[in-house]
Amino acid sequence: MRHRICFFLLFLNSHVYSQTDKLNQFWNEYAFTKDLSQKWMLELNAGLTSSSVHGDSNIFYNVTQVYARGWAHYYPAEKWKISVFYSFYSNQNVPELNQKKAPEFRTALQATYSVLQTPKVKVNLRGRIEDRHIENDDEYLEAVQRFRFQIKAVSPINTFGIKTNALYVFASDELFFKTSSKVSGSDFFDRNRATFGLGLNFTNDMQIEAAYANEIVPREASSKLINAFQLKCIFNNFFPNLIKSFKRKKSVVDQGDGNLQ
């Protein structure tokens, strides 16, 4: 019995005191949406990530990722949103990958459900399945599947007395799991991401969010602890002259994502 206890303590100690690299990052994203009907909406995202490195805490030390992503959203019911996307990621130096550069093509299927709606708080649950094809050191695209589960709460704070200027706070936590691969490692649990932020709907068609994200990326060799400042700008009903204008009535699942109009 004593030997088992000693073994357990040694095992716990090896994990608690494993090497952890701390990184500071800046996540910047721009989103452009277009309502097609009450049931359908299109979205285009573009963004970049910059990061510090070991020995230099500057979050703008170098750019580690640039991406573009196209979405289609379908609203089958008031509380549901089903989404698909296709995207390209130019990964220049992503810490959790086993190499410096790794171009990636990614598709995903996502479902969002409004689980709670009150005047003071709105809560959404979100699940996503990602099919990632990442170029490895042998210069071929390796398939990796990732599964993500998020809970997000939004609380409106309308301090301006003007309906269109809706201020809100939000918080979320998301768990990531992945399949084993050469490029992304053998770990099944990928990471945990906790986010806290503040959002503002300037008008019906413009929204901005600023947030802090804490991301834990456990790895057997060297884990990562990422502290990130996140800035997201959202432009609703963009390119009104390219597609016939249509204005969706926002549903409760939209409000749980912070779109309070």
Image: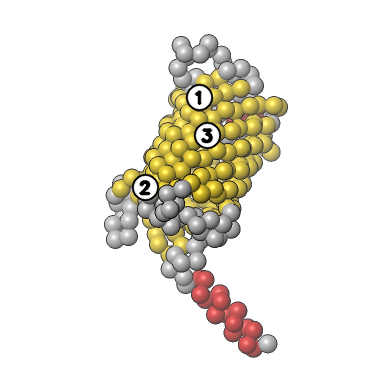
Relative height, residue 252 to residue 185 (above, below): above
Tell me what residue is drawn at x 40 percent, y 42 percent.
90
Q: Residues within 10 Å of mark 2 (few under 14, many from 20)?
A: some
Task: Indicate the amino acid at tag 2.
Answer: Gln
Task: Check the picture and name the quadrant holding the N terminus.
Answer: bottom right
The label number, if any, that marks residue 92 in the structure image: 2
Label 3, label 1: how far apart the Cα atoms are = 15 Å
The image shows residue 71 at horizontal and vertical percentages of: 54, 30
Tag 3's secondary structure? strand
Tell me what residue is drawn at x 32 percent, y 60 percent.
54
Label 2, label 1: how far apart the Cα atoms are = 27 Å
The image shows residue 52 at horizontal and vertical percentages of: 33, 53
Relative height, residue 257 to residue 99 (above, below): above
Relative height, residue 170 to residue 185 (above, below): above
Task: Indicate the amino acid at tag 1.
Answer: Thr
Tag 1's secondary structure? strand
**Label 3: which residue?**
86
In the picture, residue 98 is in which quadrant? bottom left
**Would residue 13 be visible to someone looking at this image?**
yes
**Label 1: which residue?**
33
Circles 3 and 2 in contact, beta carbons < 8 Å: no
Q: Residues within 10 Å of mark 1 (few under 14, many from 20)?
A: many
Q: Residues within 10 Å of mark 3 (few under 14, many from 20)?
A: some
Q: Nearer the viewer, residue 203 or 59?
A: 59
Which marked residue is nearer to the observer: mark 2 or mark 1?
Answer: 2
Extreme-bottom residue of the structure: 2
Tell me what residue is drawn at x 30 percent, y 48 percent.
62
The image shows residue 130 at horizontal and vertical percentages of: 57, 43
Task: Check the picture and name the quadrant holding the C terminus.
Answer: top right
Q: Nearer the viewer, residue 121 or 108?
A: 108
The label number, if any, that marks residue 245 in the structure image: none
